[in-house]
């Protein structure tokens, strides 16, 4: 996830740099008598795209964070005795055969134990 965010920020920085470089080049090449047409310039479009990219990345990051820190209930069933034990776990701490509870206990399942998510 962090790698995706860094790549997005890098793309946004490149767009901003290209927009600034193009704006400087256009100002030197333009004739001073050119009338303003009122349409958005390339720099404005570049900044808008960069802002949109950053906001979208922040939104996806926030959604991922909220989903990873959601508390789910997990039920461990011992196959030999049929005993069921319920734990509360952050979704990010839930593995296939092990998990960490919200109070810090690390639980590792045996080969015959079964894990069920309770919704």
Image: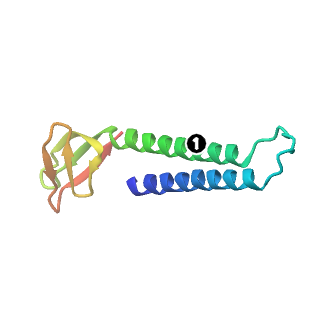
Residue at 81% x, 41% y is 39
Would residue 75 be found to the left or right of residue 8 on screen? left
Residue 18, x across and y down, in percent:
62, 56
- In the foreground, 49 or 38: 38
Q: How is the image coloured?
A: rainbow
Residue at 80% x, 52% y is 30
- In the foreground, 61 or 52: 52
What SS does tag 1 mark? helix
Would residue 48 be found to the left or right of residue 117 on screen? right
Residue at 32% x, 39% y is 69
Residue at 19% x, 46% y is 100
User: What is the quadrant of the C terminus in the image?
Assistant: top left
Residue 34, x across and y down, in percent:
86, 45
Residue 55, x across and y down, in percent:
54, 41
Would residue 84 be found to the left or right of residue 64 on screen? left
**Residue placed farthest to the bottom in the image?**
111
- In the foreground, 52 or 66: 52
State whether residue 27 is above or below residue 69: below
Q: How many marks?
A: 1
Determine which residue is flagged by label 1: 51
- In the foreground, 60 or 81: 60
Image quadrant in which you'd find residue 14: bottom right
State whether residue 83 is above or below residue 71: below
Image quadrant in which you'd find residue 86: top left
Would residue 13 be found to the left or right of residue 30 on screen? left
Mark 1 surroundings: few (<14), some (14-19) or many (≥20) residues within 10 A = some
Residue 82, x across and y down, in percent:
17, 49
């Amino acid at each position: 996830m962090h790698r995706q965010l860094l790549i997005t920020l890098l793309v946004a920085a490149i767009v901003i740099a290209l927009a600034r470089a193009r704006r400087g080049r256009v100002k030197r090449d333009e004739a001073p008598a050119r009338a303003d047409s009122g349409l958005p310039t390339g720099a404005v479009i570049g900044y808008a795209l960069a802002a949109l990219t950053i906001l979208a990345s922040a939104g996806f990051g926030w959604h991922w964070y909220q989903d990873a820190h959601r508390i789910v209930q997990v039920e461990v069933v011992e196959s030999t005795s049929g005993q069921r034990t319920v734990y509360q776990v952050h979704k990010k701490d839930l593995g296939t055969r092990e998990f960490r509870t919200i109070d810090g206990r690390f639980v590792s399942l045996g080969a015959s134990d079964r894990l069920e998510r309770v919704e």
